[in-house]
Amino acid sequence: MSLRLLGNEFVVEIVNRDDTRLQGSMGKVFLGHQLILLADVQSRDQLRSTVLHEILESCNMMMNLDLGEHQIACLETALYAVLSDNGVSLESLVARMKEEPSGHPG
């Protein structure tokens, strides 16, 4: 599936957790390839959290914010809680990822 971030079209792939591109992570952004990888072993709740984390990571890189991994993780946790506590769900985004083939070689 594709995801628009700050005017850029990213391909999002759910891949096997053993995919070496993940480097042991649950998610990974490849800014130069406009690619976001997500490990397939996650629950739906974990997948929602991970995709939000990778969106923040992408914004961090594209906007040269120079945030560290800890700061991004804290922002993801806070934003996820705010969205969840106020009835905003990322479920439709996750459902699209599971249903649509990426169309990206990899």
Image: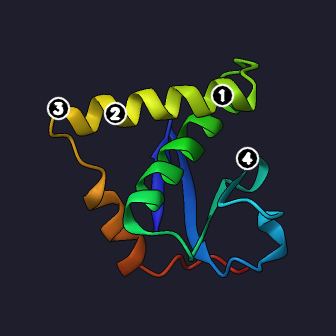
Find the distance from the CA under tag 3 to the CA under tag 2: 8 Å
Circle 4 packing at 10 Å, graded few (<14), some (14-19), many (20+), is: some
Instruction: Name above or below for residue 67 compared with residue 76.
Output: above
Q: Tag 4, which secondary structure?
A: helix
Q: Which residue has dot 1 on it?
A: 60
Inspect the image, locate mark 1, and give the three-letter code of the amino acid beneath it: Asn
* Dot placed on the residue nearer the N-terminal end, 4 or 1: 4
**Looking at the rendering, which quadrant does residue 97 occupy?**
bottom left
Answer with left or right where residue 8 lies relative to residue 84.
right
Instruction: Name above or below for residue 51 compared with residue 17.
Output: above
Return the mark for residue 4: none
Q: Are marks 3 and 1 in contact (CB under 8 Å)?
A: no
**Looking at the rendering, which quadrant does residue 26 occupy?**
bottom right
Total residue callouts: 4
Q: Which residue has dot 4 on it?
A: 31
Find the distance from the CA under tag 3 to the CA under tag 1: 25 Å
**Residue at image point 27% right, 58% down:** 91
Q: Which residue has dot 2 on it?
A: 81
Find the distance from the CA under tag 4 to the CA under tag 2: 26 Å
The residue sitting at the left extreme is 87
Mark 3 or mark 4: which is in front? 3
Return the mark for residue 86: 3
Q: How is the image coloured?
A: rainbow
